[in-house]
Image: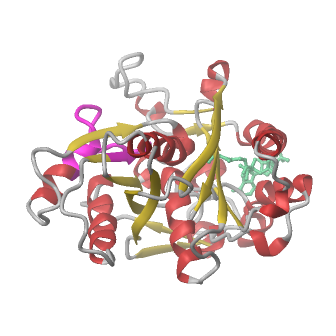
Amino acid sequence: MFGVKVSSIGIYLPSKVLSNYDLEKMVDTTDEWITQRTGIKYRYISDEDSSTSDLALNASLNAINNLKTNNIDKIDLIILATNSPDYIVPATASVLHGKLKTKTNLISDNTGSMDVFSGCTAFVYALITASSLIKSGIYKNILLVGSETISKLVDWKDRTVCILLGDGAGSFILSYDEDSTKGLIDANVGSDGTKFDLIYIPVGGVKEPPNCENLNNRYLKMVGREVFKIAITLVPDKIRELLSKNNLKPNDIKLYIFHQANIRIINGIMENLGIEANRVYNNIDKYGNTSAASVPIVFYEALQNGLVKEGDLVLFSAFGAGFTWANVLWRL
Ligand code: UT7
């Protein structure tokens, strides 16, 4: 078995910023309500012409430019985690592949491409998938991307959802390492498909194809309060299980990277587990909930701020539509 290292990370945010005060002019809400209930102050919104593959392209080029080693001559596979795909068919990873192929020699016709499409948990699911493929020796380098233009799936008249979400992308280049203790140590995942309609888009798939009558249902619907209630107890329970299986206590983890859904959910998880404040880094105030992109974006900023170094234990944790959840124990 090989180890896995994060050879490089890049992120990309669109240029347009939407503040809570901007939202006050669009729906019946206030900066005070949004800040107190969610911790969000700003979110980035992509322009009309940009799609998920465009944001993914910029984040990935950023990661490629940030590579400190010349040892990588080829990326074997692109895995893209998203809930706002460019098309239903093909995978957005394939669209990204086409765009990257003209810009870097690392991507060729021998680079595979696939999407992971499992709610806000998608990036963490994809991290487990990519790491396992590298650990087993099948692939050496994988480009792992979380990218969303989820703002395009939002009903901007629905104040219960539109205040939460933002666009963005983050890319990891994951590589094999001779040191088998590096990277993925353990993970737990789960889902409850009976709750698929807590967060979903009713119209647009084959179940309910769009027609003249149902277009109002082509937007993301969410039973926020229910999601909140599940997440705040399920996530800490599952983290506790993963830690105890590995003989670890909550404060043995140097840094927790939580999906940025709601600051009250994150604080509730921390309180439940007794996690010290300096072991968590959040940026939900700046970006809102960027769905499958939130984990790579928050990890990128944590690295930039020097919060972790080689050898440190990190725990990645996410939950979302499905209902799905996943936790990853990782050694840098
Ligand atoms: O990435 C994973 C996906 N999603 C999530 O993680 C979302 C999880 N859930 C949440 O973050 C929270 O449940 C929300 C932020 C969505 C809502 O917060 P809440 O504290 O659960 O509020 P609530 O839904 O219980 O609503 C409280 C009140 C309601 O009014 P009434 O019925 O008490 O009169 C809502 O109509 O707040 C009202 N409300 C708003 N008021 C001002 C709902 N949205 C807004 C708004 N501005 N934007």
On the question of residue 98 being in view, the answer is yes
Determine which quarter of the picture holds residue 327. top right
Measured from the top left, where is residue 208 in percent x and y? Answer: 41, 18
Vertical placement of 210 versus 224: above or below? above
For image coordinates 20% across by 47% down, the residue present is 95
Measured from the top left, where is residue 8 in percent x and y? Answer: 39, 69
On the question of residue 168 being in view, the answer is no
Q: Which residues are magenta?
A: 79-96
Which quadrant is the C terminus positioned in?
Answer: bottom right
Vertical placement of 73 versus 123: above or below? below
Which color scheme does this rendered protein use?
secondary structure
Is 109 on the left-hand or right-hand side of 22? left
For image coordinates 45% across by 46% down, the residue present is 131
Measured from the top left, where is residue 124 in percent x and y? Answer: 54, 47
Is 214 on the left-hand or right-hand side of 160? left
Is 269 on the left-hand or right-hand side of 151? right
Residue farthest toward the bottom in the current orientation of the protein: 305
Vertical placement of 271 versus 133: above or below? below
